Image: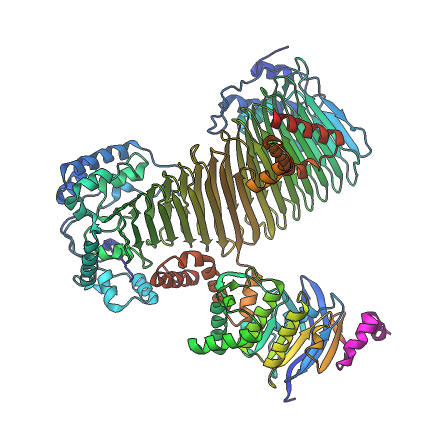
Amino acid sequence: MKKTIVNDIDFSRYNIKNEVRYSYKTEKGLSKKIVEEISERKNEPKWMRDFRLKSLEIYESKPMPTWGVDLSELDINSIVAYLSPDTKMKNSWDEVPEDIRNTFEKLGIPEAEKKALSGVGAQYDSEVVYHSIKDNLAKQGVIFEDMDTALKKYPDIIKEHFMTKNVTPNDHKFAALHGAIWSGGTFVYVPENVKVEVPLQAYFRMNAPGTGQFEHTLIIADRGSEVRFIEGCSAPQYAVSNLHAGCVELFVKEGARLIYSTIENWSKNTYNLNTKRALVDKDGVIEWISGSFGSHKTMLYPCSVLRGKGAKSEYTGVTFAAKGQHLDTGSKMIHLAPYTSSKVLAKSISKDGGITNYRGLLKIGPNAEGAKASVQCEGLMIDEISRSDTMPIIEVLNDNVDIGHEAKVGRISDEQIFYLMTRGLSEDEARSMIVRGFVEPVAKSLPLEYAVELNRLIKLELEGTIG
Amino acid sequence: MKDTLLEIKNVKAEVDGKEILKGLNLTIKKGEIHAIMGPNGSGKSTLCNVIMGNPHYKVTNGEILFEGEDIVKLKVNERAKKGIFLSFQSPEEIPGITVDNFIRTSLSAVTNKNMPMLQFAKNMKEKMDMLDMKPEYRTRYLNVGFSGGEKKKSEILQMAMLNPKLVMLDEIDSGLDIDALRVVAETVRKLKTDDMSILIITHYNRILDYLEPDVISVLANGRIVKEGDKNLAKELEKTGYESILDEVLS
Amino acid sequence: MIKSLDYNTIQELIKSSGSEEKELRVKGYEVFSKVPMPMWKRVKLDDVHIPYYKEYKSAIIKNEEQDGLVTNLITKALMDDDLNSLNTALKRNFGVDDKFKNMVLAFYNTGFSIRALPNSNIKLPIAVNYAVNGDDDTIIDLNLIIAERASNMTVMFDYSSEKRGFHNGLTVVIAKDGSNVNIVKIQRLSDDSSNFDNNIVITGNDASVRWTQVDLGSRVDAYDITAELEGTGSSAYLNSIFLGTKNQSHDMSYKVNHIAPRTESNVDVKGALKDTSKAVFRGNLDMKRGAKKAKGNESEVVLLLDKTVRSDAIPALWCSEDDVQANHSASAGQIDENKLYYMMSRGLSIDEAKLLMVEASFNPVIDTLPSDTMRESIRDYIGRRISG
């Protein structure tokens, strides 16, 4: 199951003159008025409107960050925040940009889906699929709803958890921005001891409007539950506003287990500034599986706060930066309680002048007796014009710990290529195989179809045939 | 000649600017087991690498005719597709890629066909049994953490599956204990067909006890300096390479 | 005579110096006076006071008269050659902080220039001792060590004190083509002293520099060792041990820049922390574009001996060249439980066992020190601090 969101095509780019087809479009730039309009259009309760306005204040009071990727070309005020509640994603297939169409071809996305995914055609029969899954889940008491709807259906639980104890608008400028103009997203609640068999995919709520750049994902895995969530997909995602400032808040309660997989492949003009954080209680487990491919610039540091005794977090990620891309990613593991453990495996690939940074934080607090942590970073440089940097920070405030960090960088060795060529592979095939081997730990943690896509995506990236 | 598989004519080759092969001549017939012996540094490994087409080695003179065709300009994988196989002395480790996956891909590249899964599995089992390799190896990452002996067996497994015309064994006896050596050598012998030639590079010649050569050539100072039959090995054991060199230089 | 670190003092100092030396001090002062005291997040400088300017008369140097060796007390005179070398080094980015680095350039009150002539093999290690001696408690040393082509030498620096002192130094090591230089620095100032050290190593083709750093004393200790591997085939091996006890703070920075091809480096840091001590390890391994076939390795291992210590590590790895091998590792933890049990079953108390483990970790470095008495004295010191 693949998904592409073609949110809004900036027709001016392709010099196509068309009437404005959307029923609603906010004016350029952010202001109180606009935020109020957004809230009103969505028919939100007053507390959410107030929350948005407060966030806007905080956003305006904070300066742009001076570290990480270069954000100087990002003009937030010229965002056309596309947030209409009743837009249907309908375009003509011919208007979908050629490189996107080509990518769909190469990724083997079937015809019908292509059209649906690019907004062509009416409600796809995923509706049917979606509904049946929803029904099954409902029987278990699982809530799986798009955020806008959830806000109205479950106001108490949302109010309690939405940007209150986890990510807050005060965290940083883009969290505040998100708080002000968030739209769409997913809400998942898994009741105590329920094990959800099927991985929940954001794809399923595709028919919810306002998807894309400012989605808010809130997942609460209640005690003893198990659930797997897959966000994003490998097909390119287009956004007119070249900013993706989403937010993911995860609550893993006592003894629960949550696997959160993401493959991000935003289009190459996007600034991807995402905030993801998990709060893990006693004996809870969070596993992050992350593949970052697209975007122009990304800053992404999934954070796990291990606040309950025995809480665990594992992060497996691969970052692939090609020409013109600067992907600054990493993971933050914060150990606040005893016998917590964390493991990071971060792999990065840079090619054609692409830049990858691993920026990680491993913090062991004074109460984290018996904490164990390991970090392994590997950088693969495909050529001599790219960059791969690793900047981890390790802070230890307790002696009863076992911490290890390792990083290494290198290239695909000539000897490895030669060896593979002696077995009949061409040089390109050899490179491709080695890179696939390199990302294997991430691929094997994904559901099969995603793994297949991942491999294909890598092949395309290596060949340089993607955008 | 119709039954000539490989003909190396007056080949000079250098690596890192230093000339190692200084006008080497060698002929290997179809189905022949041909051993190359010689002192260290004489160019034995260089010879294999030059036949395989390792880009680090530059051929500055001469021809290499494989089945009558000069292959000097062919890329490494093109030579593999022609049926040339090199069993490495220290094979590379490729983390993340299983033995199974690797061999399937290689087979598909060399034969240009996809072997059906069942047949592939059957073949793998057959060959692995011959080599005394446990089935678990199929799912292990290629050569990662393999002992010296396991690596050599992994090489021969690949050879067994690819069924090449020219098999070059680069010092396969180094690092193998007696039992492993026997298993490997016997497997090679069993797999050998009349259409398969074997070029054995050896320093210690233990392997020649299990794989009896038809021809033994001695490589010294970048050239083949002497040729003989299987008895030459015993002679060399007694007298050492010194005597050959003296003989040649005098 | 006690004077402030101000413009007047500079004027006095340059009254009788040559024009180049004047320029050095004046330029240094310009930067020093403009730059504020740094605010560090990890090692707090609250109780570090900018010292007064004092002359320093207690520098001792041994084995400075050997064939092929030219030694000079820098405060007596700065040779032209020396100044040139100094200026080359100053163009690079190194040092704990601009404030401290330029303080030395402006106000140095001691230091040696030590030059091994081409092809000379200096057999005996040159030993320099800067000790706090009575009122002689402000050590601002500027050292220049130059190994001419194909020469070999070992230079040892020992910073010691029984009572409170202030040390801020700058050492430049230039290892020209084919030379081998061995530097040892021992820092064992008293528990209430402050120590700052700015070091840079520049290598020529096929030169090799070995640096051994033994960091034991001071309340606040911050140093930087930067190695610029700009000669093809050159190498730098930096081995260090550090010990934190009571409320000491160590901020240690190692920067290795691989600029030329086929350069090699290895940074090996072993530490132990006790009581409420703190350490920050900053390792920067930078493989610059063009440093083909370079090999770099950094590793840090810290033994945590008490619950109340704090250990931070920032082992950064920067890479702009694909044809390299670069590795970095950092680890922290307690003494292995099994080993502890084994030792105790042989009669050692927990403390004795801890000491033994620290010694085991430190010995490989201590063993490389060129003097027997030095080794003894350091083992002794460590023993006392760990058991105390």
Q: Nearer the viewer, residue A364 or A68?
A: A364
Where in the figure is residue A164, as x and y percent of width and height?
A: 26, 36
Furthest residue in direction top, as rendered = C1
Is residue C303 in sight in this rendering? yes
Is residue A268 in sight in this rendering? no
Q: Nearer the viewer, residue A167 or B13?
A: A167
Q: Residue at x 27, y 49 (%)?
A: A193
In the rendered structure, does residue C347 fall within the stretch colored magenta? no
The colour scheme is: rainbow
Above or below for C35 versus C252: above
Decide if residue A352 is on the left or right side of residue B46. Answer: left
Q: Number of numbered discs present?
A: 0
Furthest residue in direction right, as rendered = B250
Quadrant containing the N terminus of chain C is: top right
Quadrant containing the C terminus of chain C is: top right
Q: Residue at x 77, y 39 (%)?
A: C118
Decide if residue A178 is on the left or right side of residue B124. Answer: left
In magenta, the rendered stretch is B225-250
Where in the figure is residue C89, as x and y percent of width and height?
A: 62, 34
Q: Quadrant of residue A341?
A: top left
Q: Residue at x 31, y 54 (%)?
A: A230
Above or below for B25 versus A248: below
- Magenta span: predominant SS is helix
Where in the figure is residue A181, as x and y percent of width and height?
A: 22, 42
Where in the figure is residue A136, as x and y percent of width and height?
A: 20, 58
